[in-house]
Amino acid sequence: DVHVAVPCSFDQGDGIHGDVSATVGGGTTTVTASGEGLESKVITIDGGTLDLTSSDDGINGSDGSGGGGGAGGGPGGSSAVSGVSVTISGGTTTVTSAGDGLDSNGDLTITGGTTVVSGPTNVESYREVVSGGDLLTTSHDGYLSRFGVAHRRVLMISHDGGRLDGEDTVS
């Protein structure tokens, strides 16, 4: 049985980093503090015990280009980045994160194992139909411990989908 403990601070960056790929296939790996807990272009977790603590994203599938922005190019970005993936098919993965617990700028697939993610404790989301469109207001306290601020996002999309306006506030 292999046990690896990686103490790392936010200033030091990633707890575990792979330029091309990172695989957790057995043993016990613990990152006690980091910016990104585990970051690589291709991440595969198929066994073992992984325990990550991060002040940003817990697991981040990224090619370093800054493209994408969420699994499948969700609300945080415009499109998925080709060749970037996070795959969890076994093992026990525990993530405590002030940012995104699981983030992939490409594909994100979970087919097995046990995955537990904890992060911001106060997350709110409200949708309201207003004249001209739909208003979505969200907020979270994920940056509170690290920066002392909460994040609020307001989006307004027109009824025909032709216009999207937004505003981010940190306070």
Image (cartoon, helix red, strand yellow):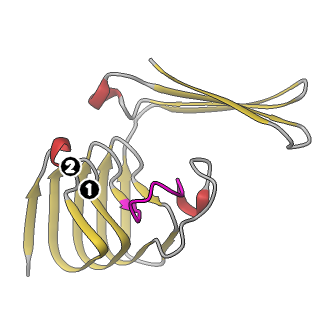
Q: Amino acid at mark 2?
A: Ser
Could you tell me residue 30's position as x and y percent?
A: 15, 61
Q: CA distance from mark 1 to mark 2?
A: 6 Å
The residue where tag 1 is placed is 37
Whether residues under marks 1 and 2 lie with C-beta atoms below 8 angstroms apart, the answer is: yes
**Quadrant of the image for the N terminus?**
bottom left
Could you tell me residue 37's position as x and y percent?
A: 26, 56
Label ID, residue 34: 2
Magenta segment: 60-70
Which residue is at the front of the view, 115 or 23? 23
Q: At 20% across and 43% down in the image, what residue appears?
A: 10
Which residue is at the front of the view, 56 or 112? 56
Q: Does 68 sit left or right of 92 as displayed?
A: right
Q: Main secondary structure of the magenta part?
A: loop
Q: At 22% across and 71% down in the image, what residue appears?
A: 49
Figure check: 109 above or below 99: below
Figure check: 127 above or below 36: above
Which residue is at the front of the view, 7 or 114? 7
Q: Few, some or many C-alpha atoms within 10 Å of disc 2 (few <14, some 14-19, many ≥20)?
A: many
Q: Quadrant of residue 86?
A: bottom left
Label ID, residue 155: none
